[in-house]
Image (cartoon, coloured by chain):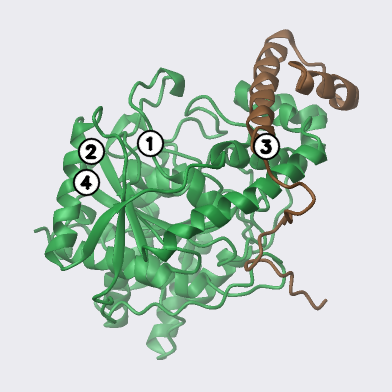
Chain colours: A brown, B green
Amino acid sequence: MQDDYSQTLFDASVRPLLEIQIDPSLDARLQTELKQLDQLFRELRAFKIDSIGEPAILFRAGYGSGDIDE
Amino acid sequence: MISEHDIPITFRSLGHLAKAIGSGELTSQQLTTDYLERLQKQGAALNAVAQVIAEQALEAAYHCDQMKRTGNPLGPLHGIPFGAKDLFAALGTETHWGSPAHDDLEWNYDSFAVSALKSAGGILAAKLAMVELAGGGGYSDASASVTGPCLNPWNRARWAGGSSSGSGAAVAAGAVNCALGSETWGSITVPAAFCGVCGLRPTYGRISRYGAMALSWSMDKVGVLARTANDCGILLEVLAGPDRRDPSCVGPGFKWEPERSLSKDLRVGILQHDMSKTPEVEQAFQCALDALQRIGIRMMPAELDDTAPVAAIASLTIMAEGSTAHRDFILGSKFTCLADEDQKAGLLAGLAIPAADYIRAQQIRTVAVHRLNKIWAEYDLLISPTLLTEAMAADRPFSEHQTPWGGNGGPGNLAGWPSLSVPMGFGPTAMPLGLEFIAPAFGEQDMLRLAHEYQVVTDWHLHIPSDF
């Protein structure tokens, strides 16, 4: 994974949508956050799973069947 | 041992006050007036209050007393004042989610939880302070709130914990009898432990989140802060059950049975932590274990599976879901009004998480939760110090705090397990410590009963802070 994966994604997909101008001090904190995010990605990618065979559930089984009738 | 009769009335348990009102020894109007005075004085001095709802509360108290006189009690909370974290919608009140940027929310209806407590006779007396957006994005110090740093009733130089800060502080200060809170990762158990009260984080899906601000759809839980485990059981019975307005909430109702004895075969696992740097916590925890042993509880060491990256999954999930929930706000012009700079950076960063990485995190979560759940083949309940630290300074960045936090919030919240923190004594600087009971999903009954038995033989929950 490239070292600036999150920064690249942020600059391409989020920054153009912002109504606000990010000031330099916030930008510095943002870079720190994006580096930490890269670390999370690395940690998760290092955990090997069968990406096809392993089911993904967004609301966990047994708790959220979404029993809505309206 | 301290008795409940030895402490002022606003510090007594819900169970005790319900009996006093039921017997006519106390009226709701008297009780509500006492709590409102404390909200206005002690609550305000602690920055624990977002809004006092005096007029509505006194009207409701009058109604409760009328109903009592005509022999029509409303329910187990009849005439008892409670507070609600400022992320719950409540009719006739303002809701700000603790944020200086959210001064225009139109949430003028009762959330499920507020409505349930009112229907049971409870009187909403205050909206209580919280960390802005329940801490979404990650905050760096106690001042991340529109109401300023929420101070601890045991020492006003210390923080009350977060994000249900005001709920913890107001219950501890005797300014409300009990309070609604919410937890995504530590937001009930931390203020409960820091403030020396009980905090119940129910199973994910136990209580409807309708009308409560979302931070992380797959991890947010509504819960309560109260004076005793028995009170938490009474409140859970009122709050639990399915609600079609929250599709995650499919749990069965809950019937609190404090009198039923615990199984003699109950297996309690003691979670292992390195307490070499926190000997006072170790000593207090050992006293708690001794108390449990005296009542015949069988305990043995236990360790949670640590082969999956639980903290990374939880962090990425909360970041992605939180930034998605608040996306329009983050991209908009009022975003800069938030109080905490780190929080702003964290919320912005969360928008950069690709769907593929979020979904991969959920796949790994499935594996991780499966592995974590294996512990319930060997144990029925787990216990541990809630945290390894006392409350930290209210005016310093958390990064300067030297003592390790400890805690079990990552695994418990990721897996959706219920947890209860109860007072366990005091630490090296006379601040409260918490004892945490953890159960498998929907295992609140045994968890609350064991904590209740612990509180029958100890009196830490009856200690109260000196007044100010």
For label 4, the residue is B285
Indicate the quadrant where residue B342 lies: top right
Mark 2 closeness class: few <14, some 14–19, many ≥20 residues within 10 Å: many
Q: Secondary structure at mark 2?
A: helix
At x 46%, y 82%, the residue is B74
At x 58%, y 49%, the residue is B368
In the rendered structure, which amino acid carries the disc numbered 2?
Val
Disc 2 and disc 1 in contact, CB within 8 angstroms: yes
For label 2, the residue is B281
**Front residue of this view, candidates B280 and A57:** A57
Share a chain, discs 1 and 4? Answer: yes
Q: What separation in Å lies between label 2 and label 1 (alpha carbons)?
A: 11 Å
Disc 2 and disc 4 in contact, CB within 8 angstroms: yes
Q: Is residue B232 above or below residue A34?
A: below
Q: What separation in Å lies between label 3 and label 4 (alpha carbons)?
A: 33 Å
For label 1, the residue is B406
Disc 1 and disc 4 in contact, CB within 8 angstroms: no
For label 3, the residue is B319
Q: What separation in Å lies between label 1 and label 4 (alpha carbons)?
A: 14 Å
Q: What separation in Å lies between label 1 and label 3 (alpha carbons)?
A: 21 Å
Q: Nearer the viewer, mark 1 or mark 3?
A: 1
